Amino acid sequence: MTNATTKPTVATVWLDGCSGCHMSFMDLDERLMTLAGLVDILHSPVVDSKEFPQNVDLTLVEGAVSSEEDLHKANIIRARSKYVIAMGDCAVTGNVPAMRNYWDRSDLFDRAYVENAQEPVSPEARKALLPLAVVPPLRPHATPLHEVIKVDLYLPGCPPPADAIWFVLTELLAGRVPNAMSVSRFGK
């Protein structure tokens, strides 16, 4: 993974998830400074970069693929990344976002935007507003990352602990393929 003349490049991406995996990444605490000396972090939602860069060595992807926007991002990530890690249970299995697969989508929208809204919108008004909605179109089902792109490594956990993220990153940077299941497991 390392190159003799330049540091490896790393990106992190957040699809349909809760940001818990990125919070664990931030929980690397002082190890973030060490990581900054080992890699160049080119893209992350915590730095608010808008466009995914070209030629990324390693990308950690949090979240399930639930919307057309998620699918579009996943395809760009795969095309521009040498190595992709599904980080966390949502990316690995679909986890909580995939729970919506068992419900009618219009019922879910009514629950979220009518019943639970601070200012409920009638179904008729919602239909009139739908063309103006900024919510990306949902895919028929929320899916794990590997169902839409090739994934090179799975790092389970909800979220994976910071120590597991550190272990995986440092093993890859040392040129070894880590056994992520030895440091993290589903739901923990």
Image (cartoon, rainbow, N blue to C red):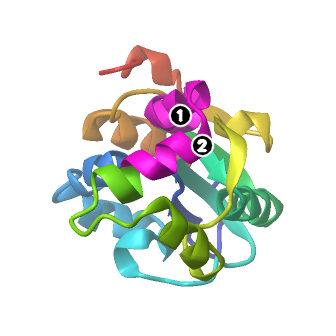
Q: Quadrant of residue 151?
A: top right
Whether residue 68 can be seen here? yes
Reading the image, the residue beneath label 2 is 105
Whether tag 2 and tag 1 are in contact, CB under 8 A, the answer is yes
* Of 7 and 101, the residue lying toward us: 101
The verdict on residue 181 being magenta is: no
Q: Which mark is residue 100?
A: 1
Say what amino acid the circle numbered 1 marks.
Arg
Residue 152 in the image: above or below residue 44: above
Q: Which residue is painted at 73% across and 60% down in the image?
A: 81
Q: Residue 22 appears at what percent x and percent y?
A: 34, 54
Residue at 42% in and 15% down: 182
**Magenta span main SS:** helix
Whole-percent x, y for residue 71 in the image: 73, 56
Quadrant of the rendered image containing residue 96: top left
User: Horizontal placement of 147 versus 24: left or right?
Assistant: right
Image x and y of residue 108, in percent:
49, 43
- Nearest the eye: 61 or 83: 61
Q: Which corner quadrant of the image does residue 50 belong to?
A: bottom right
* Image: magenta residue range: 88-111
Within 10 Å of the Cα at label 2, are there few (<14), some (14-19), or many (20+) other Cα atoms? some
Q: Amino acid at mark 2?
A: Arg
Ranked by sequence position, the earlier of labels 2 and 1 is 1
Separation of marks 2 and 1 at Cα, in angstroms: 8 Å
Q: Is residue 80 above or below residue 86?
A: below
Q: Residue at x 38, y 41 (%)?
A: 165
Quadrant of the frame with the C terminus: top left
**Relative height, residue 69 to residue 131 (above, below):** above
User: For the residue carrying disc 1, how many other residues have a C-alpha within 10 Å: few (<14), some (14-19), or many (20+)?
Assistant: some
